[in-house]
Image (spheres, coloured by chain):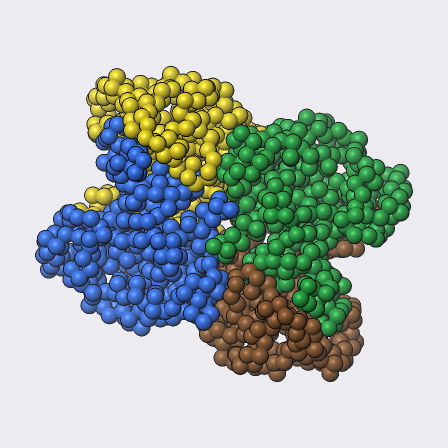
Chain colours: A brown, B green, C yellow, D blue
């Protein structure tokens, strides 16, 4: 109930502060007899590594995952899978000077008000570092989805106001921005360099595409698949909006345009984004998540200290300029966790 | 786990099909000793009554709520509150001809694929009628919020592509569209009449504003208050997108613009929409939900029957042209239920 | 979280006070396409009717169940099944004089301390009447178990200190005590008449036998099948002890006696009661529940009023002398609900 | 839903196999600002160390606990507390010869049937070793109970058929059996030596006493405090029966004897064991748990191999003769976890 767990049958609990000894995840409810090794998980973790591309910080996180339990001779055993990632490069010293200041756009002030205590070093649980545990757990979810032929791919749809064209599945990993549009990717990189030079940061829009998902996933009324996907994505610190299919544009369509005609060969259009009445229709699932710019910036900002006194702050340390591309594998992981859970939930109706 | 329950401490379970004997809600976890009468609930239900305004259908739903349990001598007793609304005006006959057809944009096809059985009359659980039970439950949630000084008001921010200006709290109930902008309301009504004449339907955007919410509500990591609000709203059948504060626009801002400066008198701007790192900051909470156009339209559409054969369909019956304004009290109810739950969840940290 | 719901996939929520308008249950998570009618449920309800046998009170509860939702054309639809039983014979007047007194052995004092408010009429939620809703829900659970060939039968193993011999499956329903031993049943009836004459009450032990249960049900570590059965039975107001297989006697055995030898034809003995390490073994499940004597007695007892002042009380009204046999179908229902849930939970491992 | 988590607000998830790299627990929902160090937890762990007394095995488990997250500067931070205990003395080799055999009285056969895969080394999750993680989590629960003045003490009430007299709070830790009766303790030790010599094992009964618990804890209907305590204790592998207050004896009492008279100074007797209608009454809570003899014995037993063929087995390795006294701190931990959860759950009614 404390919000550190997501999922019902397939559930993921993350723990750990950004500057504590380690972070980790408990993946529970994974069916037995699925091949799973540390390499399967490490592959996903490596995709979110900082410093990977232009938008990253020079901070070097090794992020070596270790499986502590739940597998036996290379297969899942049906028991809880405990994953741990030790924190090896957490420089607490960098944060000493902001101990008593609230960073604008950060959870510093709200954590303090909620708990009356907070780990000020790097954001604690609110840090982006916590998402490494999600990516690790998502790698386990993907093994379940693989078995069912479900594929998830996310791309950069927009960055710093620059829009990318092209289908998500055409994202080109070697342009380092997971961007399906090489021309746009070049402009985005320029935009990132400008922001870095200005001591500023950028946001963007991630689009997630799911192919091969069977019809029937999602539970009416409150646990609609789109409701759970929205929660999963909005549960990423940086996300301020989520839309499915035509999303906000659907609000401007007439019914005769928005309704996807049904044909013997499937849906003629996909404004629904693969979901009808909260249940997957068998079509491609399309989701977009709006990411705000990174809150930690070098430019001076107005704030208060923990006593409520006016102050200014310039956040040093090693920060990314844009949460994209690092957020891409995190979005994929959250979608994977949600779908794996609903896939297992649907087993009860197939008896 | 079947998705008919929302909330952890304050939980709401709805039941009932649109054309069954009745619908209802169990509200569990409501603290004791709160004054609660059927009139408190009826008031909210009356706000979502069809035929109330221009966008409505002529269908006359009485929607009389009855409290069957959980109160004693006019006060909540701490035990589950069972609310029932009998279905008095459900004309099943209207639906006989679409028994074997899937309506485009509807859950007909996905329910059939999920369960292998469905109540085809009016959509069963996927019907908008189910939301009456949510409004009833939301009225109980509001009693808890009232006690804490938390106020929720929703307005029509956009309808059929027409945008309304003005603050949500200035919504004028007597323009029947909960629209804060009289001029826009007039245009919206014209737009609705045009759509009705064309056998078509419209969508829109609802904006929900929460005032008086204390700081500290919301649970990291997965049960962030914005994650739970997104789930609650996306769990309404018609909603295809949810955003908080600046929402999708935040993706286009730089950090120095997006970050709300903190001053001794509060936040200087509100791009965060009153939520930082998934926890309420004490500022106004601003949420927008994108509603697609109503799926049931008189115009002929392409579809298939339950055997997969091509067919056409023109949905008769008494349908609204636009889900707005009826969705407004539903959005408010979902926000109220979510906040009441998080308000009670936070009690554990205040010991 | 308020304790009115049990089960994870197959879940049951009960609501209603003994002297309110109605009581009921929401059965959620029942798979679709199972034949279910009101008659299926009524049959079980009729077995717990008061006044049925010698131990009963003259109170005449009709207990007509109505299915309000969740079935379509005689089959479950996968949606929540709402069951209601109206209270037709609740004589609130009988309770006026004990409004300000706490009945010894009752929940009067603890409900008051917990909530600061209580429905004093007949015990509210703590009344045995609430168990009618459980029996109704249990009838739905039994339909799921029937499909899997799982059979549950409970008998009176002991009553007022008189022990019955014979196997539970030989319980003779027409001796009105569900007692497998006719000779013991006669003595029990005499004992009941003596207690009634003395204005006193009796307790007893119920034994529940489950046959046909497949191996593999139960979840380590905390949701062991015996842990969940213990919770389900201890959650009946009258139950003060639960044991599995050899139970408390196992504590006095040596390992070489207690361990059930495994043979190619199954287990040679059944001290484990069909459960090993919290998982069903495929053998017969044997459970016993100790029921305390009914708390409401005519004999004068020492108590206090709501102001803490010493008083005496003699509880009038129409009360049973012994919770047996009425508790028998309730025990069966709680076991049925628990097993149905675990049967569905195990589906995830069988993919 | 996989049964590795217990509790609602205060929740504990354990992970790890007996012969894997480590075991651990995630304690979530612990309120912030409670002083907590590794020493607080180590103290409890040391009480369950094997080889501590006569009943133990010579196996030397160091059981050093490490806090990986959730505290900041010596206080709980409101975030999940991750506890880890590395397995340093797990001799897998000992188990090679029973890889294909099912040990009578063990979960070998049921795990295999449930999952189709099992970690045969020492029982995996079914091992008593898993309970170390519970004791660690229970130490955190105790910090919450301490703050409320709630004290838990367990004693050996019976061992190998020998009954101890005296109150639980008088248990003498230095007799190594947590036995309140020195004379009985001496006989028990002799009985243990006899069993060890015979290659056999013993069971016993643990009694847990809770003092200082406020009235009002426990949730009707299904989450009665006694129901949750029964589940918590029956969820320990060795426990086959649980009773509250007079327990099974209550079934033989008449109502006039069993009902505890209420006086201005409290209850005159305590047959209810401090719980009425599933809610604590303010009196002492008394619980007993029946523990079967340890299943692993040196004496030859009849069994089958994983192909169903008849075989004999004599379990070597380093096993305890009796689960008492090691189970004592585990019982205390399970009661502590349950009470801490219900204490926090009750906060919502005290607003």
| Numbered circles on residues, count | 0
Nearer to us in this view, D209 or D294: D209
Q: Is residue D25 left or right of residue B332?
A: left
Q: Quadrant of residue A288?
A: bottom right
Residue sitting nearer the eye, C17 or B96: C17
Q: Is residue B93 visible?
A: yes
Residue at 23% x, 68% y is D59
Along the viewing direction, whichever of A130 and D30 lies nearer the viewer: D30
Q: Horizontally, is D181 left or right of D235 in the view?
A: left
**Rendered image quadrant of residue A184:** bottom right
Rendered view: D256 above or below D92: above
> In this rendering, does residue B292 appear at all?
no
The location of residue A274, given as percent across then percent down, is 69, 53
Relative image position of residue D106 (x, y in whole percent): 28, 54
**Residue D255 vertical position relative to residue B321 in the rendered view, above or below:** above
Q: Residue at x 37, y 46 (%)?
A: D214
Residue A301 shown left or right of residue D114 in the figure: right
- Residue under the image location 67 percent in, 49 percent down: B233
State the residue in front, A174 or A113: A113
Considering only vertical position in the picture, is A112 above or below C186? below
Q: Residue at x 26, y 17 (%)?
A: C197
Q: Position of residue C202 (x, y in %)?
A: 27, 26
Q: Provide residue D166's location: percent of width, then percent of height.
A: 17, 48
């Amino acid at each position: 109930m404390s919000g550190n767990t997501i999922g019902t049958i397939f559930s993921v609990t993350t723990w750990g502060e950004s500057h504590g000894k380690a972070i980790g995840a408990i993946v529970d409810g994974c069916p037995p007899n699925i091949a799973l090794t540390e390499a399967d998980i490490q592959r996903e973790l490596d995709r979110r590594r900082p410093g990977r591309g232009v938008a990253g910080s020079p901070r070097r996180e090794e992020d070596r995952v270790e499986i502590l339990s739940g597998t036996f001779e290379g297969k899942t055993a049906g028991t809880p899978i405990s994953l741990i990632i030790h924190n090896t490069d957490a420089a607490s010293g960098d944060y000493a000077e902001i101990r008593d200041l609230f960073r604008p756009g950060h959870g510093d002030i709200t954590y303090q008000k909620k708990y009356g205590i907070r780990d000020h070093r790097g954001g604690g649980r609110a840090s982006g570092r916590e998402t490494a545990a999600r990516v690790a757990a998502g790698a386990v979810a993907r093994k379940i989805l693989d078995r069912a032929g479900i594929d998830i791919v996310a791309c950069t749809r927009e960055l710093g106001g620059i829009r990318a064209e092209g289908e998500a599945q055409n994202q080109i990993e070697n342009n380092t921005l997971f961007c399906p549009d090489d021309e746009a990717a070049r402009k985005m990189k320029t935009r990132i360099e400008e922001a870095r030079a200005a001591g500023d940061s950028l946001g963007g829009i991630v689009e997630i595409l799911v192919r091969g998902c069977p019809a029937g996933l999602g539970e009416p009324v409150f646990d609609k698949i789109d409701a759970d996907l929205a929660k999963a994505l909005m549960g990423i610190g940086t996300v301020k909006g989520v839309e499915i299919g035509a999303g906000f544009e659907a609000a401007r369509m007439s019914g005769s345009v928005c309704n996807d005609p049904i044909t013997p060969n499937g849906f003629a259009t996909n404004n629904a984004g693969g979901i009808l009445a909260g249940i997957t229709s068998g079509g491609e699932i399309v989701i977009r998540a709006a990411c705000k710019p990174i809150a930690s910036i070098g430019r001076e900002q107005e704030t208060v200290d923990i006593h409520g006194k006016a102050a200014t702050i310039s956040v040093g340390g090693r920060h990314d300029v844009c949460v994209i591309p690092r957020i891409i594998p995190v979005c994929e992981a959250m979608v994977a966790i949600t779908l794996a859970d609903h896939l297992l939930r649907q087993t009860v109706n197939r008896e």
